[in-house]
Image: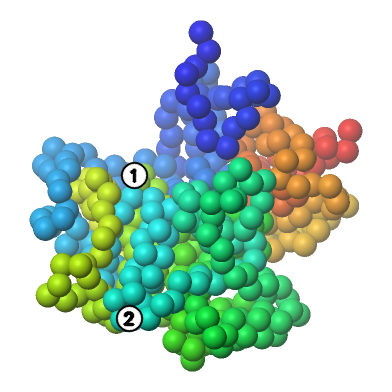
């Protein structure tokens, strides 16, 4: 009998093989049939240090035997208290309140609801959300609404709420972005918030922009009293070289979304951090002004224990040093790939390296990406190109030799495309 499992982002009608993974360690996934795969994309951008990181695995095991799950509305537990305190210290100064949820999409939904609730509770009719062109913030209806419209959400588009889009700040086009943002912020219909992926737009194709630009966009919002939401679901926990991407621009957003690497990627947990002003606009002696949001697994103790172990690793081990070593290996790999006549526009930020195929017809649904993916899989590399963008975003434990191996596989996969 065929499997009853319905997989995400998978066209079951194509009959493509679905490998079964039995175990993992470090940068490697071990298939049930004995093959092993180098995890070139950190299992979709979540694993930071490596798979089954011993300190995180031990924290999960210990917590699972102590306190598994509990209601978080009106009750608390030590793991959540410790984690919230750590996040306030680690995050950009001025984010003093931590709201827990369970995925990047819900962290974004919470951020949007906080922003709208903030203006509602202040008696201001502000509902418009500004977004950056090519952005991605998750797959729930609200998160899709603030993301780019594409084949991904065509069926749902009539139900997505309207947003105003600011052009992506590509090199040389920065002033156009700032002018558009300025015009929207100054318009009579005052926006509620601007949501951005800091420094690099992941699902949009690993599109990078400068820290100066991030700072300038944040300043425009501050001048017009438009809330600035930083979605660091992908960029957080070292992906761009620093713990958070916002650090490189020296900015504090009004709201910060964290998920994916928050637990080192081992178990699902998300946090939305907010400024005192946003918390205060919900604090009152009226119950009608509370923040109306919860999910069953809010601040799950096992997940919080994993996140505390992740924080301890960041505090006690040289994680930035590992990312720098990884970055140097990725640079060497990009230099090799840049010599390939079919590749161009190599770029790296922190532990993310990307390069584009020179093809004009390579939308997400073209068969270039699946062919590269299949070739890499056969050669022992988990790769998942975004349209014509090939990228590596490996766990930080990946060695320079392993990166060289991945690069050789990519080079061969691109060669094979020509045939
Ligand atoms: C992955 C991602 C999300 C969604 O996170 P999920 O945990 O998959 O819901 C949101 N924002 C960004 C920038 C992401 O990369």
Q: Which of 417 and 54 lies nearest the eye of the viewer?
A: 417
Tell me the distance, in whole angstroms, between the alpha carbons under discs 1 and 2.
39 Å
Q: Is residue 57 above or below residue 133?
A: above
Task: Give the left or right position of residue 322, taking residue 391 as reference.
Answer: left
> Mark 2: is the Cβ under 8 angstroms from ligand 1?
no
The residue at 47%/56% (across/down) is 142
The image shows residue 221 at horizontal and vertical percentages of: 50, 84
Query: Dot 2 surroundings within 10 Å: few (below 14), some, or many (20 or more)?
Result: few
* Residue lying at the far bottom of the rendered structure: 223
Q: Position of residue 80 (x, y in %)?
A: 19, 58
- The dot on residue 267 is 1
The residue that appears at 61% across and 25% down in the rendered structure is 12
Q: Position of residue 307 (x, y in %)?
A: 29, 54
Task: Please tell me which residue lies in front, 57 or 91.
Answer: 91
Judged by depth in the image, the label closer to the viewer, 1 or 2, is 2
Q: Is residue 214 left or right of residue 70?
A: right
Q: Helix, strand or loop at disc 1? A: loop
Residue 26: quarter of image? top left
Is 350 in front, or is 19?
19
Seen at 12% across and 75% down, the residue is 285
Quadrant housing the C terminus: top right
- Secondary element under disc 2, as helix, strand or loop, is loop
Q: Which mark is residue 123?
A: 2
Per the rendering, the mark at residue 49 is none
Q: Label 2 near label 1: C-beta < 8 Å? A: no
């Amino acid at each position: 009998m065929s499997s009853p499992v319905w997989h995400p982002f998978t066209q079951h009608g194509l009959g493509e093989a679905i490998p079964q993974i039995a175990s993992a360690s470090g940068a490697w996934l071990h298939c049930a049939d004995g093959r092993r795969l180098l995890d070139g994309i950190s299992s979709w951008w979540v694993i930071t240090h490596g798979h089954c990181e011993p300190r995180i695995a031990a924290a999960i095991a210990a917590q699972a035997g102590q306190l598994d799950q509990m209601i978080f509305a009106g009750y608390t537990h030590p793991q959540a208290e410790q984690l919230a305190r750590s996040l306030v210290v680690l995050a950009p100064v001025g984010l003093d309140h931590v709201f827990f949820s369970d995925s990047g999409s819900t962290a974004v939904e919470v951020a949007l609801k906080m922003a709208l609730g903030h203006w509602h509770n202040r008696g201001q009719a502000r509902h418009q959300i500004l977004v950056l062109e090519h952005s991605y913030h998750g797959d729930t209806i609200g998160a899709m609404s603030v993301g780019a419209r594409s084949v991904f959400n065509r069926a749902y588009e009539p139900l997505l709420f309207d947003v105003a889009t600011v052009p992506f700040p590509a090199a040389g086009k920065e002033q156009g972005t700032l002018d558009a943002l300025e015009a929207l912020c100054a318009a009579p219909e005052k926006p509620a918030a601007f949501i951005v992926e800091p420094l690099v737009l992941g699902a949009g194709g690993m599109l990078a922009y400068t820290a100066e630009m991030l700072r300038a966009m944040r300043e425009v919002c501050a001048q017009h009293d438009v809330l600035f939401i930083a979605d660091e679901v992908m960029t957080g926990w070292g992906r761009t070289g620093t713990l958070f991407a916002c650090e490189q621009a020296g900015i504090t957003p009004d709201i910060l979304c964290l998920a994916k690497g928050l637990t080192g990627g081992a178990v699902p947990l998300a946090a939305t951090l907010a400024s005192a002003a946003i918390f205060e606009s919900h604090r009152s002696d009226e119950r009608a002004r509370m923040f109306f949001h919860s999910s069953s697994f809010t601040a799950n103790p096992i997940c919080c224990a994993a996140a505390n172990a992740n924080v301890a690793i960041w505090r006690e081990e040289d994680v930035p040093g590992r990312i720098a070593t990884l970055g140097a290996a990725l640079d060497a790999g990009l230099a090799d790939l840049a010599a390939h006549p079919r590749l161009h526009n190599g770029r790296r930020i922190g532990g993310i390296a990307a390069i584009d195929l020179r093809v004009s017809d390579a939308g997400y649904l073209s068969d270039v990406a699946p062919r590269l993916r299949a070739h890499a899989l056969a050669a022992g590399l988990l790769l998942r190109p975004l349209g014509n963008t090939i990228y590596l975003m490996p766990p930080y434990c990946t060695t320079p030799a392993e990166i060289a191996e991945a690069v050789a596989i990519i080079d061969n996969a691109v060669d094979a495309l020509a045939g």
